[in-house]
Amino acid sequence: MPIFKYVAFVGGLLLPRAKFKLMSAFSNWVRDRFKAGAAQAREVAQAEALLQQARATVPSLHIALDRQLNRLDVLMGVQPGTYSREIAISRDIPSVPAIPRKAQPTEILRRRPDVIAAERRLAATSERIGAAISDYYPKVFLPGVLGLDSVSGARLFTPGALGALGAGALRWRLFDFGKVDAEVAKARGTNAVALANYRQTMLRAIEDVENSLSVFIQTQHDSAELKAEVKALTKARDLSEQAYRAGSITLTDVLDADRQLLSARDHLSASRADVARAAVGVFRSFGGGWTP
């Protein structure tokens, strides 16, 4: 279940745990400076408030995560709580499964259920044209058998298609060609409608694929930009901490750098979730059908 693992990891508690760990270490560091006489009580209170704020966000995130995991279990047809242990241990987020390079675009689109259904309906109407045209030709039946001269499921056991025949039976709708012409025209009209529906289904499938690929590519670009932002803000935060230790800036400046860094990490985590959802959208638009 690679897609389940991918989405579940993105929706996990990796970022909240990292945030809590960062604020906890920062609070301990400020408390040690206060004991050494290098920090004020106000700074310790500020650090403790931020730590408690980080702790307060964890329960709500646990509730949301449990609900999503239970929903995924139900969608997969298993008892809620079955796969929750698989993400109990923190690990790297798996990469998006790649699409086979040998697969042709037409082969990928023909995996879609709507395309398969439209293609089968078109093939069925083509067969009905041949069945209708066959009524122009005489039909010869063997002696003493039960004759069935219809290949259409709707007419298979109608009085006109079923009958007990004697020796040397010959049936030819020679004086009924007007009705045969109408049946052929009707079959061709039905085939034309099926062909138009098939073309429309293919166009919608291509539109769905193009939209899903566009969303996937753009979310990947957004995630890359946010990753670079987090890297820059991490460096800025480290420099702010060094300046605070040197006494050149106040604790407020360090807390502001922390706030910007944690906000960027939140956005990066949300962007990774968007990438996962976009990847699922791509696989759905292609109809799946391969093993990553």
Image (cartoon, rainbow, N blue to C red):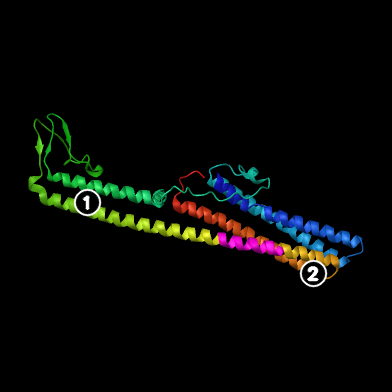
| Magenta highlight on residue 160 | no
The residue positioned 62% from the left and 50% from the top of the image is 93
Q: Is residue 289 positioned above or below 231 on the image?
A: above
Report whether residue 53 is seen: yes
Residue bearing mark 1 = 187
Q: Closest to the observer: 56 or 107?
A: 107
Q: Secondary structure at mark 2?
A: helix
Q: Amino acid at mark 2?
A: Thr
- Residue 252 numbered mark, or none: 2
The residue positioned 47% from the left and 52% from the top of the image is 284
- Residue bounds of the magenta highlight: 220-233
Magenta stretch: dominant secondary structure: helix
- Locate the N terminus by quadrant: top right
Q: Kindly indicate the quadrant of the structure image that contains residue 156.
A: top left
Q: Position of residue 191 (x, y in %)?
A: 25, 53
Q: Residues within 10 Å of mark 1 (few under 14, many from 20)?
A: many
Report whether residue 258 is seen: no
As drawn, the residue found furthest toward the front would be: 102
